[in-house]
Image (cartoon, rainbow, N blue to C red):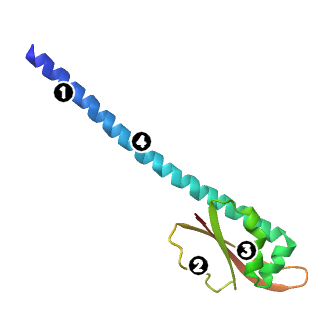
């Protein structure tokens, strides 16, 4: 009779161990999928903002004339409150960098080459990070 009780205890221990390991794996997996959703949302946001800049004549003019402050103010309403952002305008071959940000940064760029009166190709680089 004693051997039968030991067998049930071992089965119970194995079930508890499996439940603990499964719970740990679920917690780790759920944290990983949250980060993927943030990066996908940031990518889609950047694409829509850069397309908005390229289609808006006033914002294109700001980009071609190196008016970063006006361009930043022009797209502020397009960026949700949980993201912070910065736009850099530089020549096509020059590097565009953003310093002093301690968070994960998502970067995408687009080239604005001309409008009806000006040909001065510029690279617009949009930096987005979560607050």
- Say few, some or many: other residues with alpha carbon within 10 Å of mark 1 (under 14 / 14 to 19 / 20 or more): few
Q: Is residue 106 left or right of residue 9?
A: right
Between circles 3 and 4, the one closer to the viewer is 3
Q: Is residue 81 left or right of residue 32?
A: right
Residue denoted by label 3: 72
Dot 4 lies on which element?
Answer: helix
Judging depth in this view, the residue of 81 and 129 nearest the camera is: 81
Dot 2 lies on which element?
Answer: loop
When asked about the image quadrant of residue 125, the answer is: bottom right
Between circles 1 and 3, the one closer to the viewer is 3
- Assess whether mark 4 and mark 3 are in contact (beta carbons under 8 angstroms): no
Q: Is residue 94 left or right of residue 7?
A: right
- Assess whether mark 2 and mark 3 are in contact (beta carbons under 8 angstroms): no
Residue at 84 percent of width and 69 percent of height = 56
Between circles 3 and 2, the one closer to the viewer is 3
Residue 25: image x %, image y %?
Answer: 38, 43
Residue denoted by label 1: 10
Give the number of the disc on residue 26: 4
First in residue order: circle 1 vs circle 4: 1
The residues bearing labels 4 and 2 have C-alpha atoms spaced at a distance of 36 Å
First in residue order: circle 4 vs circle 2: 4
Dot 1 lies on which element?
Answer: helix
Residue 65: image x %, image y %?
Answer: 80, 85
The residues bearing labels 1 and 3 have C-alpha atoms spaced at a distance of 65 Å
Residue denoted by label 2: 98
């Amino acid at each position: 009779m004693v051997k039968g009780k030991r067998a049930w205890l071992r089965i119970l221990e194995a079930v508890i161990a499996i439940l603990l390991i499964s719970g740990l794996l679920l917690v780790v997996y759920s944290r990983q999928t949250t980060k993927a959703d943030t990066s996908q949302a940031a990518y889609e946001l950047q694409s829509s903002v850069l397309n908005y800049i390229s289609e808006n004549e006033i914002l294109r003019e700001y980009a071609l004339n190196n008016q970063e402050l006006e361009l930043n103010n022009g797209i502020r309403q397009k960026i949700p409150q949980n993201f912070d952002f910065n736009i850099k305008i530089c020549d096509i071959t020059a590097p565009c960098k953003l310093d002093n940000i301690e968070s994960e940064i998502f970067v995408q760029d687009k080239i604005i080459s001309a409008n009806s009166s000006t040909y001065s190709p510029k690279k617009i680089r949009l930096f987005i990070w979560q607050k």
